Structures are given as structure tokens and as C-alpha cells.
Amino acid sequence: MGRCIDSAVRQTYKDIEIILINDGSVDGSAEIARSYADNDSRIRLISQENSGVSAARNKGLDASAGDLITFIDSDDHVEDDYVEYLMELLEMNGSDIACCGHGDTARDDPPRLIEGPEECLKEYLTTNEIFASVWGKIYRREIFDGIRFPEGKRFEDNFVLFRLIDKCRSITIGYLPEYHYLIQSESFVSGSYSKTQLDIIDAMMLQRQFIEERYPALIPHANARVVYAANRCLVKMADSDVYDMDCIDKIRPLYKEYGRDFLNGTSSRSAKDFYKVARISPKLAMRFYKSLSK
């Protein structure tokens, strides 16, 4: 946590408000955060009972006073010019969201401008350029009007990002590696399978419904994302040596209804091969995946 806060404090753009949310921590994080707040007037510490990531993000949004918003997860850290770089991207084209590079997305390319909500949503649905995480981005505050994270859900980013993008006149994508994401073995993304893994399917179905109502031309891409989520659940079960019939019963009709669009979409050949096996036998697909990952 200290590394995360240090990286926020060191920002080259100084006129910032740093809101730290203590989500019922019992590991000493609150004391660490308090020591930072006592020594930097830009830092505000807000404590709440353990309520999860969505509640913490919502608390920070409601408490913030700035015209721009960015998120940094407590296990991650950013470059010293993270805010300055994102603000430059945002103002370069008058965009509503700007993204920076991280991990595999980082490269030495000039920034890209995506204009119009439909084109932005198409980019989001079909590439990893506008990646499916709220961190690593800066937002104009007004696009959060009427939008908050769903409390009690995993994969909370996937429930809100498509709605935020719908409000964008444009998005500027930068590629400098300004955000550093730490993968933890028991995080929501990489931890063991549980039934809450199905939240990713709920998020993609909600996204699909939204796309169907507003952007009919993008329906095939939204359908493909539903199958992607179903595949992800099977892979997570395989990694955890679990076979959850509730999950299988949920994904079978999705494979049948949306599979063609997944095969015609932008996913990798290996993902499509996995799907071809899974639509016949989810259990066989899991074995197939396990054999390849050894």
C-alpha cells in the first residue's frame, strides 16, 4: 500500500486531491494511510466497514471534489507523471476519457483518437485498447453522473465501463507504461473459482442488452463478449479443479445462441478452438485446456 500512496504523492502534477478509502482493513493499512494523511494536506482518509471494491470506489466518487477522476488500486502503483500524462492526452483532443499503457498494452506508438460513442464502444468490444478496467484511465467527472459501481458484484468495472463510454464524445489512447498492475494469486481476477465468477456473465449480458437497445450494429460484438465470459468461467473452473453444474447450465444456452458471433469475432484461434469443444462438452474443454496448460 505504501508504494501505491508514494506514487500518488510524487505526482509531477501537484494540484490533486488524493482520497484513500480504508475498506475495513485489519492489516495495519489504516494506520499507514493515516500517517500519510497527517503529513500531506492533499490526502483525505475515509474509513468504512468492509464493503468491497465497488463500495470503496463509490465512496471515493461521492467524496471527491475535482473535475477529473482516476483510480489506483492499493496493490498497484503509477509513474510520477501518470496524472500529467493522462491530462495531456485528455486535453489534446478534448476527450472525455484518456487511457495509458500498462503491461502488454504498453508500446512506443503515438496516441490514438477514437471519436463518437459507437466507435469507442466498438473499440472497447473488439480490442484491448480500451481495456476493461477503470484504473489506468482519467475521466471527466460529469460522465459519472447517474453511474455508480454495483455493490456486492465481482468484475465491477465490466458493469459500468460500457455506460461511461456511451457518454463519451471521444477517447484518447496513449501507450506509455504509466500504470503498473500487480497480479495477486488470490485476487478476484486470478483467484480460485467460486459462484461469484458468474458475475462476469451477468455483466456481459447487461452490456449486451444495452448495446442491443442503443447500437444494433454492434450486437455481434456484444454477443461475442458473452461467449468470452462463458469461456472464462470454464477456464477458471479448470484451473481450480471444480465442476459447477450451475455454471454449466448457465453457459450452455449462451454457447448455442451467441457462438456464431464469437467464431466470427476477434478472439484468438485458441479461444475459438476452446469454444468449439466447450459447446459439445464443457468438461472435455476443461480437460483440453488443462492438458495444454501443463
Image: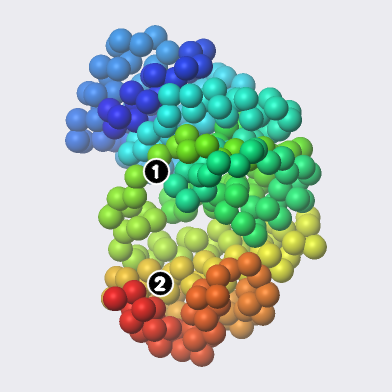
Quadrant where the C terminus sits is bottom left
Q: Specify which label sits upstream in the sequence, 1 or 2.
A: 1
Disc number placed over residue 235 in the picture, else none? 2
Q: Quadrant location of residue 22? A: top left
User: Which structural element holds mark 1?
Assistant: loop
Image height of 120 relative to 195, above or below: above
Residue 195 location in percent, x, y? 38, 66
User: For the point 62% across and 25% down, which residue is it?
Assistant: 88
Question: Most extreme residue toward the left, as rendered?
Answer: 27
User: For the point 35% across and 58% down, which residue is it?
Assistant: 190
Disc number placed over residue 181 in the picture, else none? 1
Image height of 103 relative to 141, above or below: below
User: For the point 73% across and 43% down, which residue is it?
Assistant: 114
Q: Quadrant location of residue 254? A: bottom right
- Distance from disc 1 to disc 2, alpha carbons, whole Å, reads 22 Å
Is 71 situated left or right of 36 in this image?
Answer: right
User: For the point 58% across and 61% down, which residue is it?
Assistant: 204
